[in-house]
Image (cartoon, rainbow, N blue to C red):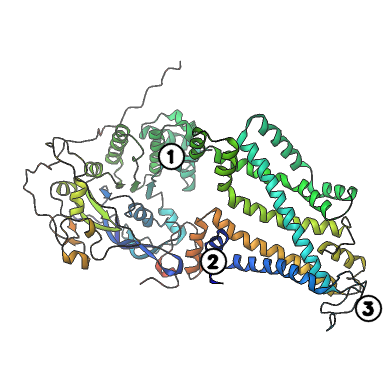
Amino acid sequence: MKVWIKLYKHSIIGRALSDQTASQWGLAVWLLLFLGAWFLMPLIGDPSEFLAEPLQSPNLHHWFGTNGQGQDVWRQTVAGTAASLGLALATGLTMTSLGAVIGLVAGYSGGWIDRVLSSITNIALVIPGLPLAIVLAAFLPSGPWTLFLVLVITGWAWTARVFRGLALATRRKDFIASAEIMGESRLRIALLEILPNLSSSFASAAIGAVIYAIGAQVGLEFLGLGDMNRVSWGTNLYWASNDAALLTGSWWIFIPTGLCIALACSSLTLVSYAVDAVNNPSLRADQLLRRRLREPMRRAIGVTPLAKELRHAPA
Amino acid sequence: MLQPNLLTIEDLSVAFAGAGDTDTLVLDRVSLQLKPGARLGLVGESGCGKSTLCRAIVRTLRAPAYIAGGEVYWQGQSLFARSPEALNKVRWKEIAIVVQSALDALNPVLTVEAQILDVLRAHGRSQGSSKRLQELMRLVGLEPRHLKSYAFELSGGMRQRVVIAMALALEPQLLIMDEPTTALDVVTQAEILGHILALQEELGFAILLVTHDLPLALDFCQEIAVMYAGRIVEQGPSERLVRQPKHPYTAGLLQCFPLPGQKKTVLHGVLGDPASFAHLPSGCPFHPRCDRAEAICTQERPLLEQRGEGSYACYRPLPDLPQEHPLSYGDSLSFPTRPATPLEEAPLL
């Protein structure tokens, strides 16, 4: 255990999260949702099983009640969390990686490669994402892989745009020039010299992409554009609305799933604060001082605080 | 003649907040006085707290710095008692700072004109500004046509002049210059400082010059304060300091460069590394590098005391040197004090 704690503390994540309490909580909540759902999946039994009277409010046999079809809401919430978070994670990471590679290649190579890739990126950017996603999802065979593909196709461009700019800015730095003079190959420079410098930007882009993937996925499925036999957050909400959960006042059908979506998204947002501090280390210095201030909210911008404004002065 | 002080710094301390409340004291009870129209030089190695002091005066230090103690009086009134709005009125209008890297101080996407105009407008002096802008450019020896230039179109020396023009735009009573000429070659340096001297004679503002270049400060300033590890270790008139350095650190700094007219000697410099704020030596922070250190220097911290002409903080000061010592610096170096005539319009090829 001690070894693991030490390993965590020295890892990139551990260092990024040290003294960022909110982000630590965010990561803990997210991991609890994700790992907890996957851990419980084999234990709860088939979530689609029709096993009781429909529309029972929460009771001892069915902790979260049953839905309009007589399925157990607890089982559906767990299975939905596992399916949706897994898909969102895969989608978000793929989306960001694709965008990052395209942006990096475009920004670093320049010339006709940049022109071609930038044009494609710009075209992808001006096509409105959700309508395209709806059209694609409606025409392709429904299922999780369709959702994955649709979201990646509609979501990579923004990251590519950002990374192209970052690559352009990094490329002009002297250490890239020295790597070029040393005769390193362009691919090596792009992947080993530029990319590590953008790792924290990648992390914040990936977090944003996962949040987007959760929202878009749930949205598409809620509209009925997914595989409706699969259990996920989106289909849970779709069936809840289909079975008129609001009309019958069966709040227990949609509250658990809705709460999970809100928790997953907000916990990721908290994690991104730590990534911001890695991106911009002076934020950390700022936090450090703000925590010591007596009235942190009334702090004047651009005025160095005096000792009497701190909670306790040093010895 | 007893003149009231323009700026009085009393026991000013600055600390950087650290994780787990382990703060680092980077400026330790520094006191300075500046009379109207005086020129004070602040000298020391890199990282000894010179820039921190400059920024602490007007409270522009960024987090995690905070002012741990002391007071700054501006024209007899405390600056630290002012509200942020009232402090903003003093900043730039009365106390202007020429920052360390003029190269980064200019906005790359605005013209010189727009940036100086910004200063005038922010303090409500935009009336008749176009005339004033041209006047400012001439004041620092630049052609008025450079008002339309962007920062990247100017050379390092020109950019420095622009920043100085900006600092002088509101006719401040104190000009703090933080390493204003460090990035420039000696010729440009002499030219710019000569300009500033001429301007000072004309406008009568006081100057606080921060530099690591002791000969420059000795030549430019009437009084010098030598800083080491966040403390002032010696202070006095330039002529006394160059002839009779009392603190071994000052003497060491003086031995870092040859003096004009000096016979061939070996330059010693100051051996060892600058003290680290995280592991400040006990007693006198300079003792590990000092060849005159004794037992008391390692145990007790010497205090800055008024002794003769100026003050110094040392238990083992250097003895007085005879008057005709080769270290005599005298008037062998001087800046051209006449304002440079504006360059004539270069013919276009």
Identify the residue at image location x=21%, y=36%.
B334
Q: Nearer the viewer, mark 1 or mark 2?
A: 1
Identify the residue at image location x=15%, y=57%.
B292
Chain identity of mark 3: A
Q: In the image, residue B126 lies at what x, y percent?
A: 48, 42
Q: Nearer the viewer, mark 1 or mark 3?
A: 3
**Viewport quadrant of the C terminus of chain B:** top left
Q: Indicate left or right for A233 with B30 as reference.
A: right
Q: In the image, residue A253 lies at what x, y percent?
A: 85, 72
| Numbered circles on residues, count | 3
Which quadrant of the structure image shows residue B283? Answer: bottom left
**SS at circle 2:** helix
Q: Which residue is mark 2?
A: A297
From this viewpoint, is residue A171 visible? yes
Foreground of the two, B12 or A181? A181
* Res. A272 mark: none
Q: Indicate left or right for B242 with A94 as reference.
A: left
Q: Indicate left or right for B222 with A212 as reference.
A: left
* Res. A53 mark: 3
Q: Which residue is mark 1?
A: B103
Q: Are marks 1 and 2 in contact (CB under 8 Å)?
A: no
Q: Are marks 1 and 3 in contact (CB under 8 Å)?
A: no
Work out how far the residue at label 1 is from the one at label 2, CA to CA, in angstroms: 34 Å
